[in-house]
Amino acid sequence: MEAKIITIVGGGSTYTPGVVKAILSKKDTFSVKEIRAYDIDEQRQEDVAIIVREVVKSTCPECKFITTTDPKKAFTDSDFIFAQIRVGKYAMREKDEKIALKHGAVGQETCGCGGLAYGLRTIYPMVEILDYVEKYANPKHWILNYSNPAAIVALALKKLRPNARIINICDMPVAIMNTFADILKCDPHEIKPYYFGLNHFGWFTDVWVNGESRFEELRQHAIAHGYLDAALDEQHWEPSWVHTYGNVKLMMERFPKYLPNTYLQYYLLSQDVVDDANPEYTRANEVMDGREKTLFDAINHYKETGEYEDDMFVVGAHGTFIVDLAESLCKENGGRYLLIVKNEGAVADLPDDAMVEIPCYVSPSGIEKVSVGHIPTFYKGLIEQQYASEKCLVEGAIENSYDKVLQGFALNKTVKSSTQAKAILDEMIEANKEYWPELK
Ligand code: NAD
Ligand code: G6P
Ligand code: MN
């Protein structure tokens, strides 16, 4: 395999050091000759690059690493584009969460009104990136996109750039499978998942390990403990994540058939989540005081002393998954992954153009979807409502339609009434003036 060029979009992301470490840790099987960091915030990217250069030096000094804000330099001949942008950064995430909560609705990065708001900010910057990539990159490139809200981004990009070579991905199911592996005392790579849904809105319907189903054990564990009483992964250990993993128990007591993605708490337990939230200190604050501060404290410490320790960031499911997937796209029988792909009949009861998260086999010829078949009415109903909410939002963005965006907000299961939807939307329009398409 020829050595690859990888461009990380959102080079200033808190995840960039971990992703670079994950790439270079695979150098024996996945050869990379150059990593480029691309961002629109030069200062943030240069700061993060201080740590990235140390990672390169200690893991694979022969790999070239550059930073740039110039799309031509970033994408020319690039083989893989790993996207992880946060449009509006944590300051806007904080507003998404706090505006929704102020009106009594779930305030979350990717779910409910916060996710819809973040979607409206992210669609067109992602279109711009796709166009740069189309213009400059290796024609056989792959864009692996983590940028949230991945469900909405995937739906919008499929509509606006249907031929783009993009695969939208999420690390949450991978992190959950790591927990399954701990419960079942097996290697995470041995887990074979059966799963359906939308991104941050899906269920495991079966889990096989070495030729036998271990689903019943996992179900009993989740009914008794949620996803707790097992090792937490490196990424999901803070108090709010522990609470989230614990909430799985409540969902399982009520809906014990399938194992839920943790993000379903925002829809199935929306009032509990609102009641448990602190409207003055949300997850955005926890991340700014945690993941972001830890990394930037280390950057500042390096600037002052020239010393660096590599325990201020993690590789986690996030870094491992994207690099495993990239490697799998380069080799025959690459592997089975949960990916966000166009439905086209894979889940029999859902619309063809829905972007579903389902198992897929990956190899150099691309993606082969695993057919899911029919799903029970309860799950179908929930998914259809969420899909309709996201679809109205995407159409609203494209058509500059206030009415359609309001429909998206009003349809969302986290929202109690159209009065609440309108109050939140109107306040979010003001907060997002700089970022949203105009809504008329
Ligand atoms: P962050 O704010 O630390 O980093 C994001 C970077 O993106 C910033 O440096 C910002 O300047 C840059 N950026 C914003 N708009 C850009 C544009 N148009 N072009 C290039 N760069 C741009 O955020 P983070 O917490 O590290 O998260 C990064 C992204 O990854 C977020 O969207 C987050 O939700 C997502 N994420 C997704 C998953 C998943 O499961 N899909 C998992 C983890 C993180
Ligand atoms: C999970 C999700 C991501 C999300 C990440 C971080 O892994 O799959 O989509 O961005 O958590 O969330 P946090 O609240 O810690 O920033
Ligand atoms: Mn995710």
Image: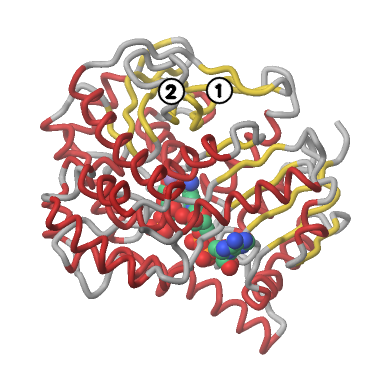
Residue underneath mark 1 = 336
Residue 274 or residue 294, whichever sits in front: 274
Q: Percent from the top left, x then y, of residue 379?
A: 23, 25
Q: Percent from the top left, x then y, of residue 426?
A: 26, 65
Rendered position, 250 above or below 67: above
Q: Residue furthest front?
A: 440
Question: Amino acid type of disc 2?
Answer: Pro
Discs 1, 2 touching: Cβ within 8 Å = yes
Residue shown at 52% from the left, 51% from the top: 147
The quadrant of the picture occupied by the N terminus is top right
Residue 171 or residue 280, whichever sits in front: 280
Is disc 1 surrounded by few (<14), some (14 to 19) or many (20+) residues within 10 Å? many
User: Which element carries disc 1, helix, strand or loop?
Assistant: strand
Q: Ligand 3: which quarter?
A: top left
Q: Residue furthest bottom?
A: 304
User: Which element carries disc 2, helix, strand or loop?
Assistant: strand
Q: Which mark is residue 146?
A: none
Residue underneath mark 2 = 193
Can see residue 13? no
Q: Percent from the top left, x then y, of residue 151?
A: 42, 41
Rendered position, 347 above or below 218: above
Can see residue 104? yes
Residue shown at 88% from the left, 35% from the top: 2
Query: Along the horizontal axis of the image, is 261 left or right of 42?
Result: left
Q: Percent from the top left, x then y, of residue 125?
A: 57, 56
